[in-house]
Image: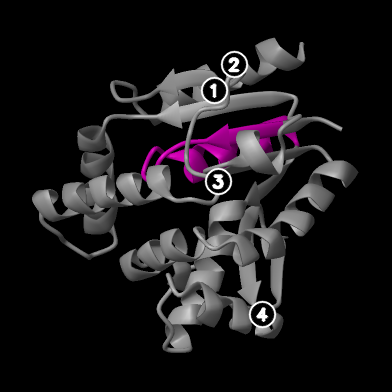
Amino acid sequence: MISVAIDGPSGAGKSTLAKRLAKELGYIYVDTGAMFRAVGLFALRAGKNPKDAAAVAALLPQITLRLESIEGAQHIYLNGEDVSETIRREEVGMAASGVATIPAVRAFLLESQRAMAKSQNVLMDGRDIGTVVLPDATVKIFLTASPEARAERRLKELCQKGQPAAYETVLADIRRRDDQDMHRAAAPLKQAPDAVLVDTSKLDFDESFALLKKTICDKIG
């Protein structure tokens, strides 16, 4: 089985690019970030602090997650509810970053993520795929872009959704998320020693896609 691990900071375009790459290559796309977001959403709905390890760990037995591809788009179900859109809210993203620091949450999701890679060709993106989840991945990529470039992209995305925001606010959120992800005790965001660094700060989507596809194809032959 071939496994491709794409790690990188929030807003680097991992999910969007990974979805298209998986479709192009015929691999199964596994959005690990969506899984953490779903756990974060459950914690918020339960009125718990996403950073409260004991409180969140106690919720895990109540959570059932399912990934499903519908007309080429991945959907995630939380206890039977399709939360694919809900988990993309800003507050859920911050909650995801909080629960991701909790070892019990990471252990809860790790087994299912690894099982997927053993049974099929997968393309998985997240924060620690190449360092922790799939340390023996066939291809490892660390996808990044400057905080400013990521803030501009996020701002454009929000405007398209009818959710206008201030650039300074979006940039501050991205920098805060970066700091939280890089300095968490459990599996912090970092580039694996054998990962290929891809910086898309000055590239558009099509250029980024072409570069990533070439990087993957060069590695798998």
- In which quadrant is the C terminus drawn? top right
The correct choice, above or below, for 141 with respect to 113 in the image is above
Q: Is residue 165 located in the magenta-colored stretch of the structure?
A: no
User: Which is closer to the viewer, label 4 or label 3?
Assistant: 3
Q: Are marks 3 and 2 in contact (CB under 8 Å)?
A: no
Q: Which residue is mark 1?
A: 212
Marks 1 and 2, Cα distance to the nearest angstrom? 5 Å
Q: Which residue is mark 4?
A: 63
Q: Is residue 185 left or right of residue 59?
A: left
Q: Which residue is mark 2?
A: 215
Q: Residues within 10 Å of mark 4 (few under 14, many from 20)?
A: few
Type of the residue with mark 4: Ile
Which residue is pictured at 12% across the width and 49% down the height?
167
Q: Are marks 1 and 2 in contact (CB under 8 Å)?
A: yes
Q: Can the viewer see residue 70? A: no
Type of the residue with mark 3: Ala
Which colouring convention does the figure follow?
Answer: one colour
Type of the residue with mark 2: Thr
Marks 3 and 2, Cα distance to the nearest angstrom? 25 Å
Tell me the number on the disc at residue 187.
3
Start-end of magenta stretch: 4-26
Tell me the number on the disc at residue 133.
none
Closer to the chain start, of discs 4 and 3, is 4
